[in-house]
Amino acid sequence: MGTRADMAPVTIALGPGFTAGKDCHAVIETNRGHWLGQVIYSGCAQENTGVPGNIMGHTTRRVIRAPAAGIMRSNVKLGDLVKEGDVIAWIGEHEIKAPLTGMVRGLLNDGLAVVGGFKIGDIDPRGETADFTSVSDKARAIGGGVLEALMMLMHQGVKATSKKCWKWLK
């Protein structure tokens, strides 16, 4: 992916595709389950399953992908409630319809160029009870892992230059 441990005084990577000790100083596990948020100082995170977390029986169906390459134009915004089949965006002249009824929880910004198959958004089937304005349990666990890794690596002085970079914390 082009990430190197020497890119910064402390380099922390999220999820699969990185090797701690080679590409970065630490990798944070992003796969849901018992190891979510785990800090890995040597080795890799679990492989990408390609399947998002199950919400009300929906996994891959919640994810909205570009049917072709083009410029993204949205017809909705984050937090909007949509019904299955509603037109929520366009990629070029291709209509993108909501795959299920629920709340728009993720959506790329207008004007972005995308390639076919690229994830452009997701629908939360919980509808009005979904909270798109707060930090999810997954994001909170990953953020906690990043903080843990950062504190440990700073304490260990990953590089001699690290102490210079972190002097403002004292």
Image: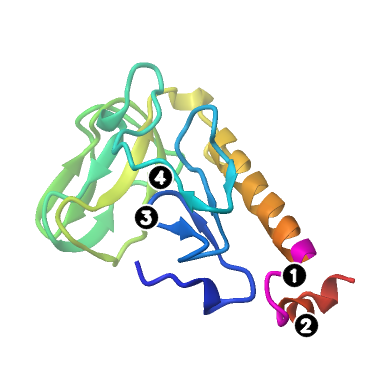
Query: How many marks overall?
Result: 4
Distance CA(mark 3)–CA(mark 2): 30 Å
For label 2, the residue is 164
- Please determine whether, in this image, residue 66 is positioned above or below residue 162: above
**Residue that appears at 63% across and 69% down:** 10
* One can see residue 75 in this view: no
For label 4, the residue is 106
Q: Secondary structure at mark 1?
A: loop
Distance CA(mark 4)–CA(mark 2): 38 Å
Where are the magenta residues, as a range? 155-161
For label 3, the residue is 17
Marks 3/1 in contact by CB < 8 Å: the verdict is no
Q: As shown in the figure, which amino acid type bears the numbered disc 4?
A: Gly
Q: Secondary structure at mark 3?
A: loop
Q: As shown in the figure, which amino acid type bears the numbered disc 3?
A: Gly
Q: Secondary structure at mark 4?
A: strand
Mark 4 or 2, closer to the camera: 2
**Residue that appears at 29% across and 67% down:** 111
36 on left or right of 93: right
- Sequence-wise, the earlier of marks 3 and 2 is 3
Q: Main secondary structure of the magenta part?
A: loop
Q: Quadrant of residue 123?
A: top left
Mark 4 is surrounded, within 10 Å at the Cα level, by few (under 14), some (14 to 19) or many (20 or more) other residues, namely some
- Give the residue furthest to the top: 57
- Sequence-wise, the earlier of marks 3 and 1 is 3
Q: As shown in the figure, which amino acid type bears the numbered disc 2?
A: Lys
- Sequence-wise, the earlier of marks 3 and 4 is 3
Q: Quadrant of residue 97?
A: top left
**Residue that appears at 61% across and 39% down:** 141
Q: Which mark is residue 157?
A: 1
Q: Is residue 132 magenta?
A: no
Marks 4/2 in contact by CB < 8 Å: the verdict is no
